Image (cartoon, rainbow, N blue to C red):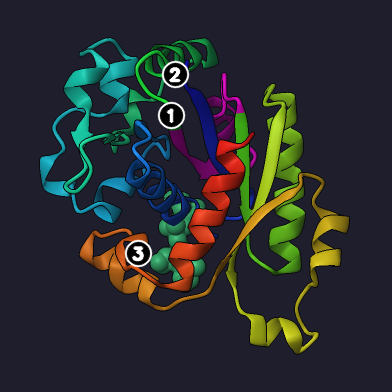
């Protein structure tokens, strides 16, 4: 039976969607069967990050609302046959689900996949708790800014209340040169402010913007340090 991993954050724009598609691609490269669910309802992004935006017909709200089975809404990755995704809805009228419906949906998916990777919305509101319903592991993404760290800690509390018992933290957009300047939080500052253990860092790389615009996860660029960052994170998450 597969595991459900939720990518979450308090602050927006810290890299949850980039994390989801690159972790998905890293898992798939190892032959792990993965489905990524875009639960950022109203703000669909994952399809663009994977270059699949022209293939969207059904979305996650159609599945949750009972209009179609999840297989109809699945999109297959262009490179890996074991990597699938279900896009978010853009239609705000289709948001009336409860946590039980979402948890049942994930439970059905875990029967057929090794990992269900959920790209959650930013914030600590109802949408985030809904995306996390029934999740096994939450990976809280944060950047090295004090505001992001405080928001990550708030997200951790909400995820705990939502019943996600295993929680971990990933630092994204890390710039070692700036860290050495002493003007950014240190790793000690991070662990003093955010309770879940750190499972990895992802360095800042402007090529991520290019790969996002081309619809190709950056881990496909072989030999890069970003690929190494994701391999380490995948090793740790597969071990949980
Ligand atoms: N390691 C990185 N280096 C450089 N840019 C990055 C990195 N990670 C993410 N980005 C950029 O940061 C921006 C936000 O990324 P992303 O969409 O993944 O964030 P998000 O947390 O999903 O946002 P939202 O809260 O809106 O869903 C994008 O422009 C993306 O290209
Ligand atoms: Mg996102």
Please say whether residue 227 is one of the residues in the magenta stretch: no
CA distance for labels 3 and 2 = 27 Å
Q: Is residue 15 visible?
A: no
Residue underneath mark 2: 106
Residue 160 on image: x %, y %? 74, 29
Q: Nearer the viewer, residue 134 or 93?
A: 134
Q: Nearer the viewer, residue 19 or 59?
A: 19
* Disc 1 + disc 2, Cβ < 8 Å: yes
Which residue appears at 16% of the width and 38% of the height?
A: 56
Which residue appears at 78% of the width and 84% of the height?
A: 183
Q: Nearer the viewer, residue 118 or 198?
A: 198
Q: Is residue 190 left or right of residue 116?
A: right
Residue underneath mark 3: 218
Q: Which residues are magenta?
A: 117-136
Disc 2 under 8 Å from ligand 2? The reply is no
Please say whether residue 124 is one of the residues in the magenta stretch: yes
Q: Which mark is residue 116?
A: 1
Q: Residues within 10 Å of mark 1 (few under 14, many from 20)?
A: many
- Residue 109 occupies which quadrant of the picture? top left
Q: Is residue 206 visible?
A: yes
Residue 191 on image: x %, y %? 83, 56
Which residue appears at 17% of the width and 21% of the height?
A: 72
Disc 1 under 8 Å from ligand 2? The reply is no
Which residue appears at 20% of the width and 35% of the height?
A: 75
Q: Residues within 10 Å of mark 3 (few under 14, many from 20)?
A: many
């Amino acid at each position: 039976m597969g595991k459900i991993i939720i990518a979450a954050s308090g602050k927006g724009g810290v890299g949850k969607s980039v994390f989801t598609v690159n972790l998905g691609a890293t898992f798939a490269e190892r032959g792990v069967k993965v489905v990524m669910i875009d639960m950022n309802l109203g703000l669909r992004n994952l399809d663009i990050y994977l270059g699949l935006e022209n293939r969207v017909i059904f979305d996650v709200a159609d599945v949750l609302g009972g209009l179609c089975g999840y297989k109809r809404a699945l999109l297959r990755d262009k490179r890996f046959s074991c990597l699938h995704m279900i896009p978010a809805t853009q239609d705000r009228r289709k948001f009336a689900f409860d946590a039980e419906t979402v948890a049942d949906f994930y439970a059905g998916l875990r029967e057929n996949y090794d990992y269900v990777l959920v790209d959650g919305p930013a914030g600590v509101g109802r949408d985030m708790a809904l995306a996390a319903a029934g999740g096994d592991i939450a990976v809280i993404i944060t950047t090295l800014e004090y505001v992001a760290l405080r928001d990550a800690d708030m997200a951790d509390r909400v995820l705990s209340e939502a019943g996600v018992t295993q929680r971990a933290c990933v630092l994204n957009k890390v710039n070692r040169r700036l860290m050495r300047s002493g003007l950014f939080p240190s790793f000690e500052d991070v662990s003093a402010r955010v309770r879940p253990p750190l499972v990895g860092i992802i360095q800042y790389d402007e090529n991520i913007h290019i790969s996002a615009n081309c619809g190709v996860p950056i881990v496909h660029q072989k030999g890069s340090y970003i690929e190494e960052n994701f391999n380490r994170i995948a090793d740790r998450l597969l071990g949980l």
